[in-house]
Image: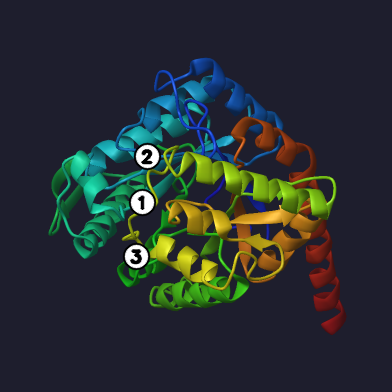
Amino acid sequence: MTVPGSHLNDVEFIGMVQPREQSEIHPPHGEAIDLGYFRESMRVHDEGGFDRVLIGWYSNGPDGFLLATDAAAHTKRVGFLVAHRPGFLAPSLAARSYATLDQLSNGRAAIHVISGGDDVDQARDGDWLGKDDRYARTDEYVDILKAIWTGTKPVDHEGAYYRIKGASPEVRTVQKPRIPVYFGGASEAALRVAGKHADVYALWGETQAQVREIVGRVREEAARYGREHEVRFSLSFRPILAETEEAAWAKAERILGRVREVRGQAALGPANKAPANAGSQRLLAAAERGDRPEGRLYTAIARETGARGNTTALVGTPQQVAEAFLEYYDLGVTTFLIRGFDPLEDAAEYGRTLLPLTKRLVAQRIAERTAHRVAAE
C-alpha cells in the first residue's frame, strides 16, 4: 500500500463498521460492543471487496484503535481508516499508535483526521477550544505526525499547542513514506488545513455543483503548497438499491418513514437543533432544493435528521447508482465512502453488485481517456 495520490485515477471504496448494529432506523441496544456483530461486519467488508472500513470516533463509543486491532486479526485484506480527533492524545503517542496498527495489520492503517464540529461533543472529552483554534491545533498536530512517521532521528517541535523534545520515530510504518491522511471539515479554516495536509479530502454527499465548487477550493488551497495535483477526493453516500428504479424509490420512502418513527434517536441524536458544522449545513442547503434535487440524489433523510452525519442517498438499481458514481468520478472524486441504513445486509449487497459495477465503469472510463490521449499525441 502507498500513500493515496500515487494512483490518482484509481477508484476506492470505503465502508463503515460499527461495534453493534445501529443506524438512523436501528436504535442501538445492548452493550456498546457486540463482538459477534462487529466481526461479522468486518468479514462482510473484507470479502466484499471494500478497500477500507471507517471506524468512527464517538465521545460515547469504544476505542477505535482497539477495534481496528481486533479487526486486523480477523481479516485478510481490507484496510482500516481510524477516525481521530487531535487534542485528546499527544501527537507523539498518536503517531506511535497508528504506526503500531500499521505494523500489526501489515500496512493497512490510515488516519481520518476530524477536528470536531460540535462544541458540546468536544466538551464531553474535555476539549474547550473554539472551532478555528481546533483547526490551528490540527495543523500543528498533523505536522508532528508526519515528521515522526517520516523521521530518521528524534523529532523536536516548538509550537502554539505542543512542545516536544526528542520524539522517537523508532516505531516505523509499513507503508512508505507514511500512512495516508484523510481529512474532513468544510469550513474555511478546515479547507486551509486540508490543502496543506490531506492525501484524501472527504466530504458528504452533495450536489454535483457543490462538489465541483469545493473540489476547486481545496485545490486552490493545496496549490499554496504545490500539491494541487496530489489531493484525492472522497464522497460519502447511503446507497438505496433495488431491482427496479420504482422499487428503489419506494424503499427510500419506507426508510424515511422509519426515520420519522425513530426521530433521530438512533445514531445521530435529535434533529431539533441546527448543526454547527459546515458539512451538515451544506447538506441542508442541498435539501432546500427538494427531496430529489438532481438525478439519483435523495436529501429527505438528511433534512429529517438535521444532517447529523452522512445522510444523503443515491437511489436506484445497482447499475443506475454505479452510473451516478461515475458522474462524480468525472468531477474528480475517486473515493466513495458508503454505508447502508441496514448496515450489514447493505454492505453485503454493495459488495455483490455496486462495487464491481462501478469499478467496471471506471475502468472503461480510464481506457477511454487513455485512448483519447494516445490519439491526440
What SS does tag 3 mark? helix
In the image, taking residue 157 as reference, residue 102 lies left or right, namely right
Please tell me which of labels 3 and 1 falls first in the chain: 1
Q: Residue 207: in sight, yes or no? A: yes
| Mark before the other along the chain sequence, 3 or 2 | 2
Q: Which amino acid does label 2 sit on?
A: Trp
Mark positioned earlier in the residue sequence (1 or 2): 2
Q: Mark 3 points at which residue?
A: 190
Instruction: Count the marks.
Output: 3
- The image shows residue 78 at horizontal and vertical percentages of 60, 34
The residue under label 2 is 57
Q: Is mark 2 on a helix, strand or loop?
A: loop
Judge by depth and name the residue closer to the eye, 129 or 284: 284
Contact between labelled residues 2 and 1, with CB atoms less than 8 Å apart: yes
Helix or strand or loop: what does disc 1 sit on? strand
Q: Left or right: where does residue 159 sit relative to residue 239?
A: left
What residue is drawn where x is 61% and y is 53%? 336
**On the picture, is 337 further left or further right than 104?**
right
Residue 187 vs 321, above or below: the answer is below
Q: What residue type is labelled 3?
A: Ala
Taking depth in this image into account, of 249 and 204 the one nearest to the observer is 249
Q: Whole-percent x and y of residue 51? A: 63, 41
Determine whether 306 is above or below 206 in the image.
above
Say which residue label 1 marks. Answer: 114
> Which image quadrant is residue 300 in?
bottom right
The coloring applied to the image is rainbow
Q: Mark 3, residues whose alpha carbon is within 10 Å: few (<14), some, or many (≥20)?
A: many
Question: Quick check: can you spot residue 24?
Answer: no
